Amino acid sequence: MPNPVTNATLLSGPISPRYLVDFLPKRLPHFFTDVLVIGGGLAGLRAANAASDDLEVVVVTKDRLRESSSNYAQGGIASVWGPEDCFEDHVRDTLSAGGNFCHNDVVDMVVREAPQRVEELIQWGTKFDSRGGRLMLGREGGHSHQRIIHALGDATGKEIMRAIIKRTRARSNVQVWEQSFTIDLLSSEDACHGAIISREDEPPVLLWAKQTILCTGGCGKVYRETTNPAVATGDGHAIAFRAGAKLRDMEFMQFHPTVLYIAGSSRTLVTEAIRGAGAYLVDSNNYRFMQDYDPRLELAPRDVVSQAIVKQMNKTQHPCVYLSLRHLNAEKVHEEFPGFAAACRKFGLDASRDPVPVRPGAHYMIGGVEVDHAGRTSLDGLWAAGEVTSSGLHGANRLASNSLLEGLVYGARAGELASQAALAAPDDFRALPIQSQRNYRLTEPLDIADIRNSVQSLMWRLVGVQRSEEQLLEALRVIRGYARYVLPHAFDRSSGWELQNLLTVSHLMAEAALSRTESRGVHMRTDFPKTDDQNWRQHLSYAFEAAI
């Protein structure tokens, strides 16, 4: 079947200024580089390492390099590795999980490139778990074979990031700006020319670049319940949208089925590999309920398991379900999943013996900046890779452990081609007369934390695992009310800009979820419970129109 097509209808999103801050180029410092990489996760650092040694590269990250979703990834990287596996099976599993919405050509490209990218990581010093000189392979939901390459048991991202950060810091042509917030992209005439960067308490810097690569990760923090780190506020989605790049599939947020649920505590991801190792899901009555929903039981794709858990919670009127590992070898549980066992111990739970309370949480944003096979966006001079993008790989539901893989493949491609474009550009590129100065800015005090908490709670209640027209209309009404008041404000710190980005992304997600009147993959409409290929096997795309 051919790939889904893009709907010609473009949604405008929230009313917003083009730039979040006013600026005059003559009053701000300028910095020039060949390639600008925004985001310091796996996709961003892989892109930076693909750049030519003859180019100057700046990597900008709003926190420390270690503070990214990549660093907290537990399960591993999906790649055909064992002799009993093959590319065709990995492709088939990805397409099956994707709800008949993947781009077949993209899936085939990424799957076939996977072993090469994993081998690179090994050459760069990543120590994956092995036994007898062979990589240990795990299995996760939706996979037909053991093909999950992992490290440190259940802390794969930590080990990968250690190795790639070390390699990046060793390159003399790469500068890393940590604790630096990207406020907006600099754009004119459908082209990107760099970004406006705030570095701690200093005045913003206009960072001009021949080519810019966006690798800012996801937006899980639009929800109250999420596995994502604090940095995942959708900044990349929002700045690309305001700059005029096309966004796509914003209704597709993946909810991870198993997030450790302890009332009053922060949420902790419970890796899918634990179910791959044989853990059961049981409800408050100790009933193994997945048999009622899918023949693949706990190893069904994430959308199926998440929706089953929510339905079972509703049936039992209980706030969570439980992972049961008591039938597994206790020593093996503690040895293979040390991070999970330690997280349980914090709350007085023995992971190998006690029922572990879990429920779904926002985990991975499938929608984002539309990119082609090379990572090109619709904006000249702007490339993108990783979770901030909509590449067509994941369709309507991401297959477990395909996310780090996507970041590696697209990071390498975007980095290589952006590098070639920068090498071909004139050496004497200059600042452009781009400025923003309006008289509508509001400056009265706002309780940023209160508004943010309200929006996150609203999104969780009304734009969560299950949605309906009534819920989505109410969500949009409230979000628009906040947006009209918050977006015109002139903030001077990251907490305000994050709130503005969060509102922008929340609006797009709710608007898209309302528009798609079917259920597909992670998008579950209780009032339209069936998948409608005839009318809805098409993308929804979004374009920005500055209205204030």
Image (cartoon, rainbow, N blue to C red):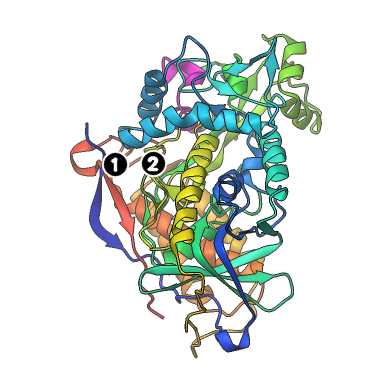
Which amino acid, by three-letter code, is at mark 2?
His
Q: Which residue, given by chain and number where applicable, does mark 2 sit on?
A: 523
Disc 1 designates what residue?
518
**The quadrant where residue 94 appears:** top left
Q: Is residue 10 found left or right of 412 in the rendered image?
A: left
User: x, y percentage for residue 291?
Assistant: 46, 15
- Locate the C terminus and report the quarter of the image it occupies: bottom left
Decide: is 479 above or below 297: below
Which sits in the foreground, 255 or 273?
Answer: 273
Q: Tell me, yes or no, if residue 249 can be seen here.
A: yes
What secondary structure is found at the residue carrying circle 2? loop
User: Pointers 2 and 1 in contact (CB under 8 A)?
Assistant: yes
- Give the camera-side residue of 114 and 274: 114
Label 2 crowd bin: few (<14), some (14–19), many (20+), radius 10 Å = many
Q: Look at the image and give the residue range highlighted in magenta.
A: 289-311
Specify which label sits upstream in the sequence, 2 or 1. 1
- Up the image or down, 448 lies above or below 144; here it is below
Type of secondary structure dominating the magenta stretch: helix
Task: Specify the amino acid type for callout 1.
Answer: Glu
Residue 283, how many percent across, how many down? 57, 23
Mark carried by residue 300: none
- Quarter placement of the N terminus: top left
Q: CA distance from mark 2 to mark 1?
A: 8 Å
* Residue plotted at (44% across, 61% down): 424
Number of residue marks: 2
